[in-house]
Amino acid sequence: MMQKTIIEPNGHNMQYWKDLWRYRELALNFAKRDVTVRYKQTVIGFGWAVISPIINMLLMTFIFGGVAGLSSEGDTPYYILVYTGLIPWALLSKSLQSGAGTFINNAGIMNKVYFPRILSPLGSMLAFLVDTAISFGVLFIMMIIFFFLEGFVPSIRILLCPLVLVWVAVLGLFAGLFLSAFNVKWRDLNQLLPFLISIGQYASPVAYSVSENFGDKWWLPIYCINPAVGILETFKWCIIDSMEFNSFAFFMSLGWTAILIPLGIKFFRKTERTFVDIV
Amino acid sequence: MDNRPVMIDLQNVKKKYVIRHNFEKPESFSGKLKLVAKRILHPTKKYNTEDFYALNGVSFQVRQGEKVGIIGKNGAGKSTLLKILSRITEPSDGRIEMLGKLSAMLEVGTGFNGELTGRENVYLNGAILGMTKEEVDSKMDSIIEFSEVGRFIDTPVKRYSSGMFVRLAFAVAANLEPDILIVDEVLAVGDTKFQRKCIEKMMNIADSGKTILYVSHQMQTIQQLCDRVIVLKEGKVIYDGDVARGIEIYTETVDVDKTKFDLTGHKPRGSQMAVIENIEITDRDNCAWFYNEPIKFRVRIKANETCKKMRMYFIVRDLNVNNVFGKSETAILPAIEKGTTYELECSVGNADILAPGKYIAGVELFEKENGIISMQDIVPEAFPFEILGEDEKNQSVEPIFWEPHYHGRMMLPETKTELI
């Protein structure tokens, strides 16, 4: 029996989810392409996935720990603190950007062939998870080094890290999908987003400790509205043993995720129907 | 009674696009006031909008195993129809039911990435076209064989020649096994030998009982491939049936027997300060000229405003609506007072190298002041005409039969070959 496809204005969602299942391999193919292309042409290949976060870490340790003189989480080495913040932050910002840019960056393909559009940012997200796994390997080596240097021992909660990282990628992706709809109509967002992300790097606990520096500030709850705060704090909590669980921020991020997933899907679906007519 | 299953069923499909125009600049004071009021009431609205139907109620059914050619001039709605059928965009109205797996080849090599090897691209492109890894695996050998890239399959495709690239890309698409195949002129790629191979492959697919929708400007391949033709015009089906008759209708939307062309009420484009009302050919009883003969016609122009520095532009297009050449009048036309009409006798010299075949002439009026060109009226399809393959003495001008798509649209008066 041949499958039946019905094309109508504002077509059925049921069919979309069926298609998504049928095309599921495509997401892996996109991810594979992204990873291969990213490292194929460079001289040191995968080395870049290692080097760029390390340079970033050295820079931020110097700025926040050195120049600004902020204190670390207990006696955790500042390098470890910063690197632990950078891993989820990089994943979050990349997923966000690729989600938001889906329609613009892939207009060439999407103009010529049908597939459930959501597979394209999903594939990119999977590729970013591969990058993240490499960065995580570097963190592991750093922890061994600091174990011998300063006797640093990570928390057993480190086993929860993969789970938190998937959460980070999903939050970034769906926030991005939510924005993608606006990105098609107002291209300004494309210019604005990198700018917002670099502000976000300071407004989120990437390279400093929240409890040590602003634990007693009255504006702490407002600060925690930022969806990135809870998720970054949770990731750090998984690695740093002495850290306390920031439950307010955690539930804040969880709430954002619960809102952004359906909203992201709704706006993305609405846009993908006819965006080729606009782009 | 045809009892093959209906594979594609289009029911009154429409596709609306919204075109935006800038607000007109009003002349009068009250008009300006109105504009200001409009801007205040609708602060975000900067444009007047107009609805345009690229498809305006298209209905037809395609049964299993039918090979349907879709033809029509540029802008007739062919591409829009393909985009809707291949689900790239949604219709604004109507309903389509399709049975089975559909593959659309609107472009070969969609998603090909230069950094990836041929093999990696085959997997990626296959997945984009809806194939699973197992399907690609089982087809890999025949894809490599068909594409003739051989041992280069593991080389990044950026090092491929354009021919190799296209062959590999087509090979992937040709090895799909859809129930419905939609093809958009992709055969017009590669060298002649490969094109023939592609057509053979398409014929094989067709013979195996698949349903094919083929859009092309090349009547020759339509004739080879299709057993039914649908002619689209301005978003509507104007003919659906026999291939030969369909092609005739397509080329005969071009009728060269008329000599009077009433253009009043044509779609307004430009400022409309002056409009072209009609065109007449007075020196013969049809629109056919011998090769090498200047084209002469009369144009009647009506002025809605006084025009002092008007010029005319003449453009020739072939039946596929590709521009062949254009020429604007060097002299400024005589001034024309508001509300009056006048007639002009036009003669297009140097058009005498147009090769035999049918063409469409377009006429435009414009004014050029301080280097700024403002269009007053544009009639892109003012009248069709034919250039005959004979001269005035009824002698054939070329020893070969002139096929424009092969020999070109221009025929030089003379070439010389001498023994040295």
Image (cartoon, rainbow, N blue to C red):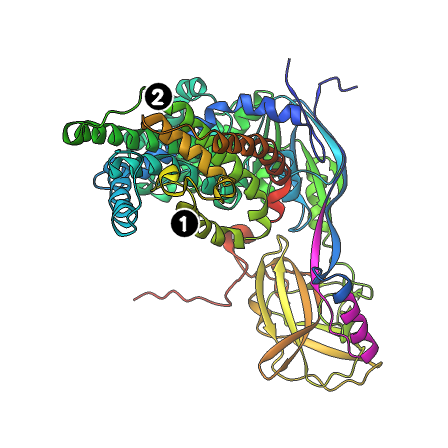
Residue type (three-letter) at the residue carrying disc 2: Arg
Residue nearest the viewer, comparing B397 with B109: B109
Q: Both on one chain, marks 1 and 2? A: yes
Rendered image: mark on residue A198: 1
Disc 1 versus disc 2: nearer the observer: 2
Q: Secondary structure at mark 1?
A: helix
Q: Which residue is mark 2?
A: A157
Which residues lie in the magenta part? B16-38
- Total number of numbered discs in the rendering: 2
Q: Is residue A76 left or right of residue A231?
A: left
Asked if marks 1 and 2 touch (Cβ < 8 Å), the reply is no
Q: Position of residue B173 (x, y in %)?
A: 48, 30
Tell me which numbered mark, 1 or 2, is placed earlier along the sequence. 2
Q: Position of residue A143 (x, y in %)?
A: 22, 29
Mark 1 Cα-neighbour bin, 10 Å: few <14, some 14–19, many ≥20: few
Above or below, B35 relative to A106: below
Tag 1, which chain?
A
Q: Residue at x 31, y 28 (%)?
A: A240
